[in-house]
Image: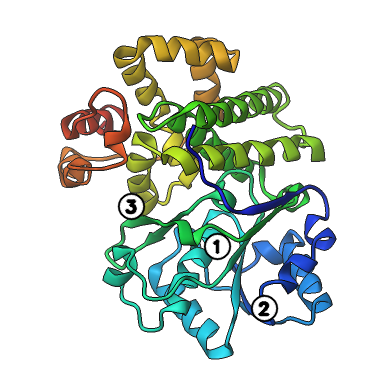
Amino acid sequence: MNVYMPTRLFTGRDCVKNHADQFGKLGKKCLIMTGKNGAKACGALDDVTAALDSQNIIWEQFDGIGQNPKLTDCMTAAEKAIAMGAEFIIGIGGGSPLDAAKCASVLAANEGMTQTELYSLKWPQKPLPCVAIGTTAGTGSEVTKVSVITIPEGLKKSFHHEDVFPVVSFGDPKYTQTLPDIFTRSTAIDALAHCVESYFTRQANEISQCYSIRGIRIIMEQFKKMLADPEGELSFEDREALYNASIYGGLAINVTGTCMPHAMGYMLSERHGVPHGTACAKYLPAFHEHNKRVVPELTARFFDEIGCDEETYLRIIRAVTPDFPVEMTPQDVADAHFRWIGNGSIAKSWGEITPEMCDEILTELFVK
């Protein structure tokens, strides 16, 4: 039951306003990292800046973080943080700004750090304190020690370190109310993938599997509602449930990490622009078939615990996963083969998922 999660977490309506004093404990200058529009549109940026102003904290904003955040943008943000003398960094958004803020907190504390030095995890100085303000219900980055960044080679590459846990995280479900339906589904699918993958890793333990099952139960119930009323709007309570589920997913992968669906999903986001959660979900049926074959007892227990039968589970996953027009050639599959060789995430799976098996999955899904 080993677990370590040092982040102080606040959730619920107006949690930023109600706990503004948390910012005052971290310093008098900070850099806020966001995307172009989302943090402002959902109200999170205004809430955060009001909280900072109430604590007499000087702040500046860097709004250059896009989906699949680039290392070069994190470096630019870190330079801005250094120039202003920032004592802490705030990320506002989904997984991209939160992961970027974690990365920039390392770079800002270690001026001139190179990509090689960043990924060596041997940092001369501890990262600046990082605050995470979640505005989507999917990533779970608010409670993890992981940062996933796109390096200049165009590949998504993560690093894990206990010093990049956010010191404080806030999750107000009202920030998710401006999300388009397709994005709400995609982020919820990401949270589902976190929970499922975590449950079926070799690293899973009793605590992580409790988090996984709770998250899955919530998400499946919400998906059933969405499918029964496709045009219906989610209530605040529904969005709060989805946000809580995303936190359960983050708590689960904080113990175990992710495995095959995420490892293979990165390729679809990098090369074809498929939203991250949707990309991961595309592999969940194949992941299920593998687990049913190599760990049948664990798979049977999984369905008992989530309160859902196999047929319904797969039907819901396929129904909520948006179609995307990705086609690959046999050469595309061959070119990706190197990514599955010695892949640590894939190796966490029960049994063995070989590079050749990954090639077969890609071929079945995308080679027409």
Is residue 33 shown to the viewer in this render? no
Coordinates of residue 5 in the picture (x, y in percent): 55, 48
Q: Quick one: SS at disc 3?
A: helix
Coordinates of residue 161 in the picture (x, y in percent): 42, 57
Residue 20's place in the image compared with 279, above or below, is: below
Identity of the amino acid at label 3?
A: Arg
Coloured how? rainbow
Count of marks placed on residues? 3
Q: Is residue 74 left or right of residue 341?
A: right
Q: Quick one: SS at disc 1?
A: helix
Q: Local crowd at mark 3 within 10 Å, few (<14), some, or many (≥20)?
A: few
Location of residue 288 (image quadrant)? top left
Coordinates of residue 40 in the picture (x, y in percent): 71, 66
As drawn, the label of residue 271 is 3
Query: Mark 3 or mark 2: which is in front?
Result: 2
Coordinates of residue 337 in the picture (x, y in percent): 17, 42
As drawn, the label of residue 14 is none
The numbered mark, 3 or 2, whose residue comes first in the sequence reads: 2
Identity of the amino acid at label 2?
A: Gly
Q: Is residue 191 left or right of residue 368?
A: right
Q: Nearer the viewer, residue 92 or 132?
A: 132
- Which residue appears at 75% of the width and 47% of the height? 173
Is residue 110 shown to the viewer in this render? yes
User: Label 1, on which residue?
Assistant: 97
- Which residue appears at 50% of the width and 64% of the height? 102
Query: Mark 1 or mark 3: which is in front?
Result: 1
Location of residue 74 (image quadrant)? bottom left
Query: Mark 1 or mark 2: which is in front?
Result: 2
- Which residue appears at 51% of the width and 13% of the height? 303
Q: Quick one: SS at disc 2?
A: loop
User: Label 2, on which residue?
Assistant: 27
